[in-house]
Image (tube, rainbow, N blue to C red):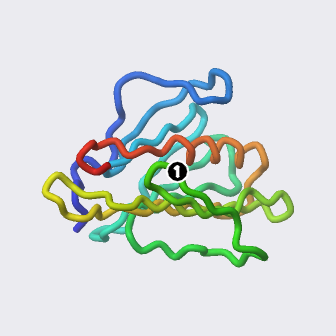
Amino acid sequence: MRPHAAIVLIALSGASMLANGGVHSSDHVIASYSITIPDGYVLRDISPPMMDFYLFKVYKKSSKTGCLKIYFGNNPGFPTMAWKDKGKEGQEGGRTFSSHPFDPKTGRMEGLIQHKNLKDSEGAPSPFSRVHYFSDGKISQNDAMVYDQIIGSIRVTDPSWK
């Protein structure tokens, strides 16, 4: 069973702002990460029961088309889609990034964030060192921009996991 099951999703107090110029949003905690979801979008836990990972779906309330799925765990199936190139890669503050930015022709995006040396307060490795995100169905360029901001908002929140 997943650690921290009792705190899978806790809404933090107050609202915050995204960098897109004043869109109201709410912060959520998933395992030892925080994520910011703007108003008009929904974060829903779609994790299968009794698994050692979390899977969330983010979608626009008013949209019937594609969504963004976000996996928190250690064994992501990255990449899930066939891409023509290896994408973009980078490093920042103890984490590495691999991404395939939004492709307007296909309406897809995908990426992986890997945190190195995350340990709990007792020194055990983090059960959630990887964050894999991917579009499910065709998404719009506007939604892709919001999804990029959501992914950019993901931070390690528990100091014992940093």
* Residue 18 lies in quadrant: top right
Q: Position of residue 122 (x, y in %)?
A: 13, 57
Horizontal arrangement in the rendering, residue 78 relative to residue 1 (left or right): right
Where is 76 relative to 158, above or below? Answer: below
Residue at the right extreme?
Answer: 105
Where is 121 relative to 62, above or below? Answer: below
Q: Secondary structure at mark 1?
A: strand
Residue at 28% across, 43% down: 158
Q: Position of residue 12 (x, y in %)?
A: 35, 31
Where is 103 relative to 24, above or below? Answer: below
Horizontal arrangement in the rendering, residue 149 relative to residue 116 (left or right): right
Out of 140 and 162, give the one closest to the viewer: 162
Crowdedness near tag 1: few (<14), some (14–19) or many (≥20) residues, C-alpha within 10 Å: few
Q: Position of residue 4 (x, y in %)?
A: 22, 54
* Residue 47 lies in quadrant: bottom left
Instruction: Give the amino acid at mark 1.
Output: Glu
Out of 93 and 160, give the one closest to the viewer: 93
Q: Which residue is mark 1?
A: 92
Residue at 36% across, 35% down: 11
Residue at 76% across, 43% down: 142
Q: Position of residue 83 (x, y in %)?
A: 73, 75
